Amino acid sequence: MAKTQAAITGVHGYVPDYILTNQELETLVDTSDEWITSRTGVKERRILKGEGKGTSVMASKAVKGLLEKTAVKADEIDLIICATVTPDMVFPATANLIAANVGAVNAFSYDISAACSGFLYALTTASQFIETGLYKKVIVVGADKMSSIIDYEDRTTCIIFGDGAGAVLLEPSLEEVGIVDSIHKSDGTGVEFLKMKAGGSQYPASHETVDNKWHYARQDGATVFKFAVTNMADYAAKIMERNNLTSDDVAWLVPHQANKRIIDATANRMGVTEDKVMMNIERYGNTTAGTIPLLLWDYESQLKKGDNLVMAAFGGGFTWGAIYLKWAYDSK
Ligand code: UT7
């Protein structure tokens, strides 16, 4: 009997209208378009403007668009998982707000916190509910309003990050398409190199935490870069090996968009040529949990049923991993 696999049957995304260019950043910090472009590949990123607008605003737009596109009614959704490190509030979960906004009245919903690996962690988690036959329609959202935790006086972070959201619908398939394999890892000793220190239970907001600028994401870029290159490439290669995939078998590498140099290193290690590498870092920067679903949204029209996709990510935690997926549909 054919095995039930969790297939992505639709994808949609949302990015805010405001474009923060490298030229505008040149007016905020000591940097240059040339440095940012050559060291990261980013040319511009989107920023969600407006008082009181959180991550759920972008995520809800992505999910509403997904429901319209797939002609699925909101009340048919069983579960919504939102990967984010910039929830609207510490609690309730942003996924709860999204479910309410889109009218998913029969769903339960929760968030997953795994920084830049969040979407892949959430996808693997969601796939278990489908493979066991428990649920039929699960939505996985990756969304972050990184501008809410970025210090626009810190040139080592403000040049990379942007805001955005992407969402996919997962449904059971017996056609040998969908998620085939996944491997994930985390290592909490990486905390020192990439974190937002305050705002949790260790350092709740106080005058001191605000004065010390502890409510911003900080990273030791060079160390994170080193770990990212090694682990993203290792895990992408590992998932290819254990599924007997050669570089010719891989139709697309879908890499987290943190830095073009990390993406190039991963592609080289896999032996995958540039034309097979999904990339939109130049337009959106690093949207953390949003990068991979936004790539799928951008490239959807080029994907064919049966295409082998290898997704790979690395991020704060540290967290990392890779997923091997067979694309489930031809674009209409
Ligand atoms: O997705 C989440 C995980 N995050 C990542 O994967 C990010 C990984 N790290 C990176 O992408 C890179 O490390 C950065 C883009 C953050 C930095 O690039 P780098 O090539 O590693 O630069 P660096 O930190 O080694 O700094 C090199 C020089 C330094 O100057 P000195 O000390 O050599 O004089 C920095 O101060 O570049 C300087 N620098 C800048 N110069 C102009 C750092 N940021 C900037 C800037 N503009 N924005």
Image (cartoon, rainbow, N blue to C red):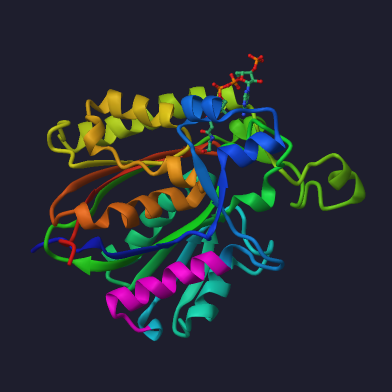
Tell me the residue at 42%/40% (across/down): 313
Give coordinates of residue 65: x percent, y percent: 39, 72
Give coordinates of residue 42: x percent, y percent: 48, 37
Ligand 1's image quarter is top right
Question: Is 55 situated above or below 307?
Answer: below
| Magenta stretch secondary structure, dominant | helix
Location of the N terminus (image quadrant) = bottom left
In this orientation, which residue lies closer to the viewer: 201 or 304? 304
Give coordinates of residue 316: x percent, y percent: 56, 39
* Relative to 35, 246 lies left or right: left
Quarter of the figure with residue 24: top right
Q: Which residues are magenta?
A: 57-73
Q: Is residue 66 magenta?
A: yes
Instruction: Please identify the residue farthest to the left as the structure is shown.
Output: 1
Q: Is residue 148 magenta?
A: no
In this orientation, which residue lies closer to the viewer: 318 or 42? 42
Tell me the residue at 36%/70% (across/down): 138
Quarter of the figure with residue 230: top left
Give coordinates of residue 28: x percent, y percent: 71, 38
Question: Is 234 situated above or below 22?
Answer: above
Q: Determine if residue 158 is in view.
A: no
Quarter of the figure with residue 80: bottom left
* Relative to 154, 5 lies left or right: left
In this orientation, which residue lies closer to the viewer: 138 or 14? 14
Location of the C terminus (image quadrant) = bottom left
